[in-house]
Amino acid sequence: MIYLGCSQWNYSFWKGEMYPQGTKPLDYIGYYSKEFNCVELNSTYYDEVEPYTILRWKQSVSPAFRFCPKFPKLISHDRYLKNIQQPTDEFINLVKLFEENLGISYVQLAPSMFRTNIYLLEEFLEYVNNKINVSIEIRPDWLSRPPLLSQCLEILKKYHAGVVIVDGAETVKYLNSIKLTNSSAFIRFLSYNHPTDFERINDWVNMIKFWQDKGIREAYFILHFVDGVSEPPIVNYTLEKFEKELGLKTEDLKEPKLF
């Protein structure tokens, strides 16, 4: 299954384009889900989401839609995966309210996490194993150290966790060093409003095709807009490529002409 989405749906500048004039912010998610079939959920990182909000979002989308929540900052950046059983349980219980709409939940490792603390990653994954589908984003400092990266990837494999692949200015040099660790792919694509964005999308379409041929179960592709503004050409181009070449489908997907 192919999932395509953005890092959020609350873009006010989409009002009057994807979102009809007069649309209330609470209704944005319903219109967003007619174009995309997943979304990265960053509000959980700041621990700002209540159970009733999860249920409201769930009721606004089709059963085929997926939310990909980010583990709270308290767990990843404040405590560096140490002594986090209680907040981890609270997070898991919260996101499980999505039921069939829950996609991959992911942890962004803190950039200042000590390399010697890799054992905490294994302890964390052992704790969450079989409770929730988890992927891990490894930051550039660890990516730049081949032995450490290999050790990380082996730990992910051991606990059937995925790896989050970030395609951006800081990480592009490491992309060829990252290998999938389970049957899912999770790509965070940083768009810079530059002509090379289109070439990079083409490369990812070809990569996902390769993974499909190898039997990958699912691929999540999340568009991030570095300047905070989603440019219509790259959004429309990505939708068209994913629909025509990768078979992107949602129950409510319209013609990919957002603007």
Image (cartoon, grey):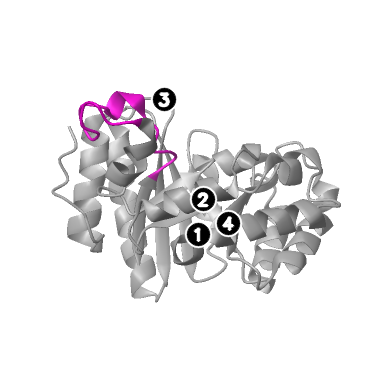
Could you tell me if the residues under marks 4 and 2 are in contact, i.e. CB atoms within 8 Å?
A: yes
Q: Foreground residue, 193 or 57? A: 57
Tell me if mark 2 has few (under 14), some (14-19) or many (20+) residues whose alpha carbon lies within 10 angstroms of its own: some
The span picked out in magenta is 6-24
Quadrant of the image occupied by residue 219? bottom left
Amino acid type at image mark 4:
Val
On-image quarter of the C terminus: top left
Task: Measuring from the top left, give residue 162's x and y in whole percent.
Answer: 57, 62
Could you tell me if the residues under marks 3 and 2 are in contact, i.e. CB atoms within 8 Å?
A: no
12 left or right of 99 in image: left
Could you tell me if the residues under marks 1 and 4 are in contact, i.e. CB atoms within 8 Å?
A: yes
Residue 131 vertical position relative to residue 136 in the rendered view, above or below:
below
Q: Name the residue at 30% across, 55% down.
A: 205
Provide the secondary structure element on which disc 1 rests: helix
Amino acid type at image mark 3:
Gly
Gap in angstroms between the C-alphas marked 4 and 3:
26 Å
Mark number for residue 228? 3
